[in-house]
Image (cartoon, helix red, strand yellow):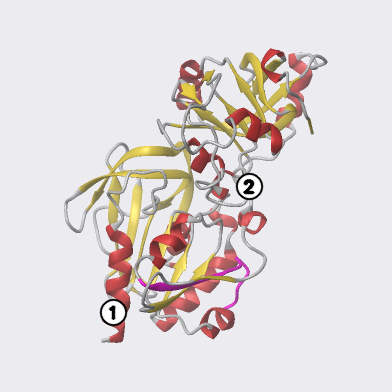
């Protein structure tokens, strides 16, 4: 529930975590209440891309960068048609945006879209708390008539957990659409939208790929009706353990040995299709500064992440699966979490992070070229 306000900066607000920790501040954006899983993002830039990333559905995002809103809000950098975060937590909001592309301030856009936020919070203390205790359910409440903390805590505890949440259909397109190739068309790709970011089909289009973006509920017949040279599975929100439909679709693609590329949620879907399990991370990886090693080359990349779940696959051996041999191709250097998978006997691979990397970095852009190489090899 939200109400419009232009005096939000003077309105008291409170963030209540499910373990009883309370942080007080001032309303930022819309005034009202919101619930979600409290998580933190370590990116120093790119808040607009973060807020419009469908993978943040039902999450209250804490910005670890102390100053937020300096560049305002423009109409070019959205990764989808709306803000998806449930709430936004910042320390020091910009009083006046300063960027030549800005059309309005960040707090104005939050208010316009009804997103309840809170400012003036010690986000360093909050981030340390979430690192120690793990991501958890939370609520942001603002306005003069906010209920006592004990009552708010009970309302937070009544909310659903992220584990077991099936969210990808909430954020995916309902109708198929086409992103045309830039320049000469070289390939056709069917992209399964599980929460796709706008920059992803754009990166493929730059490489001469005509991208047919299909709903999360697409069937194998619908995928192959576009006569794809390759199939792509996107990022998305929620628990991959609930995604039986996408897993079945990926299995059908693997049966046909069509070149396949998955990112983020798509990596978890490939893991499940290969027979591996998935699990919830304590506090996840979110930001644009995560070090990952490509074990196939030894190269270390700084990468963009947004995931709270991971694939449980062995790092130290090649695994035998229904679709041939598989191995972990990428690993996070911070905590050894699986960051990529590849099949050795057919053209299929995935990564847990975001190679389209809006707002950066761009170390992993080569992965789209790797996908192109697989499609070229299949044609040959």
Residue at 44 percent of width and 61 percent of height: 202
Q: Residue at x 46, y 44 (%)?
A: 306
* Residues at marks 2 and 1, CA–CA distance in whole angstroms: 36 Å
Above or below, 284 relative to 193: above
The boundaries of the magenta stretch are 208-219
Q: Is residue 181 visible?
A: yes
Q: Which mark is residue 82?
A: 2
Would residue 29 be found to the left or right of residue 367 on screen?
right
In the displayed structure image, the side of residue 257 where residue 113 appears, left or right: right
Task: Give the crowd class for mark 1: few <14, some 14-19, many >=20 residues within 10 Å.
Answer: some
| Above or below, 370 relative to 228 | above
Q: Quadrant of residue 259?
A: bottom left
What x and y, as percent, mark residue 95?
56, 18
Q: Nearer the viewer, residue 318 or 259?
A: 259
Examine the structure image and report whether residue 34 is included in the region drawn in magenta. no
Give 326 or 253, whichever is nearer the viewer. 253
On residue 376, which mark appears? 1
């Amino acid at each position: 529930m939200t109400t419009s306000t232009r005096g939000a900066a003077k309105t008291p607000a409170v963030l209540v975590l499910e373990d009883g920790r309370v942080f007080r501040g001032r309303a930022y954006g819309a005034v009202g209440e919101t619930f979600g899983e409290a998580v933190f993002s370590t990116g120093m830039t790119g808040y607009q891309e973060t807020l419009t990333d469908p993978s943040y559905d039902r999450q209250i995002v804490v910005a670890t960068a102390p100053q937020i809103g300096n560049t305002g809000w423009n109409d070019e950098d959205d990764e989808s048609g709306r803000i998806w975060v449930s709430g936004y937590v910042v320390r020091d909001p910009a009083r006046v945006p300063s960027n030549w592309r800005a059309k309005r301030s960040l707090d104005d856009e939050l208010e316009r879209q009804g997103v309840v936020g809170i400012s003036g919070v010690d986000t360093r203390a909050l981030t340390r708390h979430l690192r120690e205790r793990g991501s958890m359910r939370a609520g942001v409440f603002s306005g003069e008539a906010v209920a006592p903390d004990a009552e708010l805590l009970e309302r937070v505890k009544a909310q659903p957990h992220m584990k077991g949440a099936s969210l990808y259909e909430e954020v995916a397109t309902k109708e198929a659409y086409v992103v045309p190739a830039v320049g000469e068309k070289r390939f056709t790709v069917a992209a399964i939208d599980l929460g796709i970011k706008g920059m992803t089909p754009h990166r493929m289009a730059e490489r001469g790929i005509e991208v047919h973006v299909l709903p999360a509920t697409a069937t194998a017949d619908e995928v192959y009706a576009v006569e794809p040279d390759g199939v792509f599975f996107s990022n998305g929100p929620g628990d991959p353990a609930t995604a039986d439909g996408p897993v079945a679709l990926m299995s059908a693609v693997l049966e046909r040995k069509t070149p396949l590329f998955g990112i983020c949620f798509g990596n978890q879907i490939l893991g499940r299709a290969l027979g591996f399990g998935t699990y919830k991370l304590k506090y996840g990886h979110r930001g644009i500064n995560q070090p990952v090693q490509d074990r196939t080359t030894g190269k270390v990349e700084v990468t963009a992440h947004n995931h709270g779940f991971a694939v449980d696959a062995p790092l130290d051996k090649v695994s035998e699966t229904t679709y041939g041999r598989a191995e972990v191709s990428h690993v996070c250097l911070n905590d050894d979490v699986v960051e990529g998978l590849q099949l050795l006997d057919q053209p299929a691979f995935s990564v847990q992070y975001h190679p389209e990397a809006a707002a950066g970095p761009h170390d992993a852009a080569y992965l789209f070229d790797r996908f192109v190489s697989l499609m070229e090899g299949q044609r040959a």
